[in-house]
Amino acid sequence: MNLKRLSAVSFGHMAIDILNASIAMILAVLAVPFNLSNAQIALGGMVYALMGSLTQPFFGVLADRFGGRWLGAVGLLWTAVFYYAATFSQNYFTLITLMTVASLGSGAFHPQGAMNAGAAGGHKATTGTSVFFLLGQLGLALGPMIVGVLLEEIWMLGPRIMAVATLPFVVWMAFGLRKPLVRVEEEPPQPRPATVKERQRLQQRISRARAMPNRVAQPDRRWVTLAAFAVLVALRASVHQIFYGMLPKYFADLGFSPTQFGFMVGVPSVAIALGSMTGGVLGDRYDQPKILLWSLLAAAPFSWLMLDIVHGWVFFPLAFVAGFLVGIPHSILVVMAQRFLPNRQGLASGAILGFTFASGALGMGLAGPIADFYTLSAVMHVVAVMPLFAALCAVFLRTRIATALPMAPAAGSAD
C-alpha cells in the first residue's frame, strides 16, 4: 500500500468535502434573511450536487487518459476560489450560481481521487478506497461542526477562512500526485496443490455435468444485477443526500442554534465515515451483497429514532449508529462499480460517483417541494425507511462481478 499517495489524495478529499458539507448549513442559516422555502433550500443543494456529479464521468475519462495528476489539486483550488467568492453574495441567485460553479471542482476531484486511492491500496483496493472515503466523510462531518460555530460567531467571515485554509492541501496534492499511474499486471497468488479427494470431487462434478441433458438457455442475469445495483445506489444516495441537505433545516425548525445543529449533523456524518471504512475492510473479506443487505436493513429503525429523539444524550448514540450503518455500503458499491469496467477505472469511478451524487441530488430536489406541501418532518421520516427498499435490491447482486486490473505509480515516483 502506497501510504504517501493515499494520504495526499485522502486528506485532499477531506478538505474539499469540508467545503461541500457546509453548503446546507449556509442555506439553513440564510433561510430567514433570504426568505427561503424548503423547496429553495433543496433546489440549491440539488443544483450544487448535480453540477458536481454529472460532470464526473467526463472528468473520469480525463483521469483515465492523463492519470489524474493535476485534477485533484486544480479541482480543490477551483472549489475554494468560487466558494470564497460566494460568501459575498447578497441574494439567493448569486449565491447558488457561484456555488454551482464551485462544484465543478468537486466533480473534477472525485473520480481521480477514487482511482488513485484504489491504486494506492494495491491488492487491497477496497481498503484503500475506504480510507479515501473515510477522510472524505470526516470532512463531511467536520464541515457542519466548523461552519456552525463560525457562522454563529463571525458570520460569513467563517466560510471565507475555511476556503483559505484548504490551500495547503492543494500544495500537498500537487506534489503527492505529480507522478502518473501506470497499469501493471501482478502475479496471481499460487494456489496450493489439490488433494487427492479434491481432485476426485472435481472429476465427479465434471462427469455429472457432462451426463446432464442440455437445458434451455436461461436469460442473462447481468441486466438484473445492473438494474438492482442502480436502484440500490440511487435509494441509498437519496437517503444520504437528503439527510445531509435537509437535517440542518429540520433541526433549525425545532429551535436549535447553528452551533447545536452543526454538531447534531456532524455526529452521524462521523459515523458514516467510520461505517464506510468498516464496510471497505469487510468487503475485502466477506460476501459483499450480504453486508449491503444487513447494514441497510438495520439502518432504517435507527434513522427513524434519530428524527424523533432529538433532546438529551440518547440522540447522539442513535444518530451515530444510524450514520454508521448507512455508511457501510459506500466503499463496497464504488469497488463493485469499478469491477464492471476493470480496465477503465477512472471512467468507472466517475460514473458511479456521478450517478451516486446525481441520484441523491434529484432525491433531495424532490423532497424539498414535498416538504413544503406536507411537512419537512413527514418527508424525513419517509426517507428514514428507504434503506429497507435498498436492502431488497442487494438480494439480486452477485458476490463478485469481475476482477479489477491493479495499478501502481510510475517507476521512479517519489511518493
Image (cartoon, helix red, strand yellow):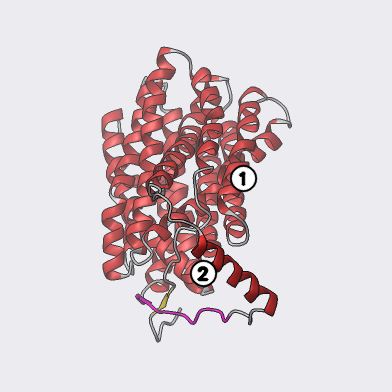
Which residue is pictured at 30% across the width and 31% down the height?
A: 90
* Type of the residue with mark 2: Gly
Could you say where residue 56 lies in the image, as x and y percent from the top left?
Answer: 31, 52
Residue found at the very far top of the displayed protein: 374
Report if residue 109 is visible in the image. no
Which residue is pictured at 39% across the width and 85% down the height?
A: 411
- Crowd around label 1: few <14 · some 14–19 · many ≥20 (10 Å): many
Q: Disc 1 on helix, strand or loop?
A: helix
* Location of the N terminus (image quadrant): bottom right
Which residue is pictured at 45% across the width and 33% down the height?
A: 245
Instruction: State whether residue 192 is above or below residue 377.
Output: below
The image quadrant that residue 87 belongs to is: top left
Report if residue 144 is visible in the image. yes
Could you say where residue 206 lies in the image, as x and y percent from the top left?
Answer: 54, 68
In screen coordinates, is 139 left or right of 113? right
In screen coordinates, is 289 left or right of 233? right
The image quadrant that residue 13 belongs to is: bottom left
* Type of the residue with mark 1: Ala
Could you say where residue 205 lies in the image, as x and y percent from the top left?
Answer: 58, 65
Range drawn in magenta: 179-190
Give the foreground label among 2 and 1: 2
In whole angstroms, how far apart are the C-alphas of marks 2 and 1?
22 Å
Q: Identify the residue position indicated by label 1 in the image.
A: 271
